[in-house]
Image: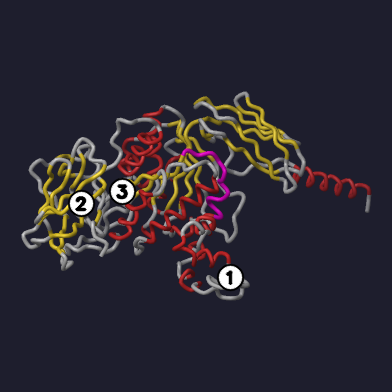
Amino acid sequence: MTRSRLLVWLCLLFSMQALLASVRLPMIFGDNMVLQRGKPVPIWGWADTGEKVTVSFLGQQIQATADDSGYWRADLAPMEAMSTGTDFVVNASNTITFRNVVVGEVWLCSGQSNMEWPVRLVEEDRRQYDHDQPDIRFAKIHISHSGTPQTDLVTDWKVCTPDTVRDFSAVGIYFARRLHRELDVPIGLIGSYWGGTRIEAWISPLGFSKAPSLNSVLHFLNRLHPVTGHVYSKDEEVPGEDELLKMQGAHQRPSRIYNAMIAPLIPYAIEGVIWYQGEANGSDDDIYCDKMKALLSGWHESWAQGDFPFYYVQLANYKAPTEDPAGGDGWAKIREAQRKGLSLPNTGMVVTIDIGEEKTIHPHNKFDVGERLALWALAKDYSHADLVYSGPLYKSYSIEGETIRIQFDHIGSGLMVGMKSGLSSTTPEPHGNLKRFAIAGEDKQWHWADATIDGDTVVVSSSEVPYPVAVRYAYSMNPEEANLYNREGLPASPFRTDDW
């Protein structure tokens, strides 16, 4: 080997070693990012084993040492909100500087296509928002899936401008704008969503272990026989595998999207999650509530940031309405499961049966969705105790002779018959009649009912049912004209009192 070639080879070798030794952070850290205020903020990455790493930001200097695998982590102490962009510096054998970093509120936006639906397709946004909003930033995660948990993903943070915001979640942006208007602090959104995806793909393996009804999925993930505990090789079929593999596309298999699009985000400090998903699980019944429990408990435990809030969207009205008072068609059952999901810790649900569209699964009104999600956050997480943040939710019922009286939570300043049209506010209809209530006797035959508001309750009856035992409200795929609201203009959730 000639001397010149030896020098070139040595230079290449040293360059490669330097590259391998360089401190590195996952891509969720970058220019323009928002760090969560008021909580410890984990910063992590990789370097040479034993290498000392110093993280410097807003007067803090935190040191960490890379372990045997090269992983290091340094937690910044809780910080106050700050809108002035500042340098964020990581020093080791090399230096990484992220520019224009602010501190505020960070929310994860996740789910399927209605969360993914971009600002550029929302007419309301094109008309009204044509200016920069530097206190709103977002990072959109590139879609990916994996059979094993990953440590990094592809994304970058952008400052909200008319050009950059075009392809980000409209629901997320409306949510952020309401929060920013009320809180006057930077709002950061992490958009991890994928159209047409089932909830199973977003659940962590740990989450499946939290829901006994989903044990078959857990055994599939671990390749274990559900009874004997036999470990199957990759070439053997696990009992129940066929059903799980019917999910269209490899990315739909349990935990695959979690592994690639959620796991690498952990433990980035967040305030909470907004979630819009369920259409791909539209045939589910109460089992969807178990899947929500698996999703949420798995995320909570993995993030190790407590039971952070999880606010979700109940599916909107869609397709042609039915005239069958029994209902139960289409998404009626999964909406009921979503309502029951409110029993899970720190959850909130937005009702959207008044803003869907018969002919599209992607309603164009994302403004009200974002606003209603923001009401939950403002009231529950930001001390806006005066806000009415939910529409009426079924609480209980009592049989009173030929009638059934329904009690509700979240009646606000009172119940009303209301009418919602497009983006306009809900208007009261003082002389209107409540619609989409059905009633049945012990024969389980359903009839459309007369329903009237009586104080803070609704009294339901029918001349065809002299001895009523059960009531249903808006319990169908498209409960068109369902019109029970509180006086703050928020719609009542569909419900049923029976379990037939």
Q: Which residue is mark 3?
A: 364
Between 231 and 319, which is closer to the camera in this rendering?
231
Task: Residue 268: say if magenta.
Answer: yes
Magenta-colored span: 259-271
Q: Secondary structure at mark 1?
A: loop
Image x and y of residue 348, in percent: 36, 44
Q: Position of residue 413 (x, y in %)?
A: 21, 35
Local crowd size for mark 2, using a 10 Å CA cut-off: few (<14), some (14–19), many (≥20): some
Residue under circle 1?
A: 229
Q: Quadrant of residue 282?
A: bottom left
Three-letter code, disc 1: Gly
In the image, 403 versus 272, the foreground residue is 403
In primary-sequence order, the first of circles 3 and 1 is: 1
Q: Is residue 317 left or right of residue 279?
A: left
Kindly identify the amino acid type of the residue bearing the numbered disc 2.
Answer: Tyr
Q: Amino acid at mark 3?
A: His
Q: Nearer the viewer, mark 2 or mark 3?
A: 2
Q: Secondary structure at mark 2?
A: strand
Name the N-terminal-most of marks 2 and 1.
Answer: 1
Q: Are marks 2 and 3 in contact (CB under 8 Å)?
A: no
Q: Which quadrant of the view contains residue 93?
A: top right
Q: Residue at x 34, y 62 (%)?
A: 285
- Lower position in the chain sequence, tag 2 or tag 3: 3
**C-alpha separation, residue under disc 2 versus residue under disc 3:** 35 Å
Residue bearing mark 2:
397
Above-or-below relation of 395 to 98: below
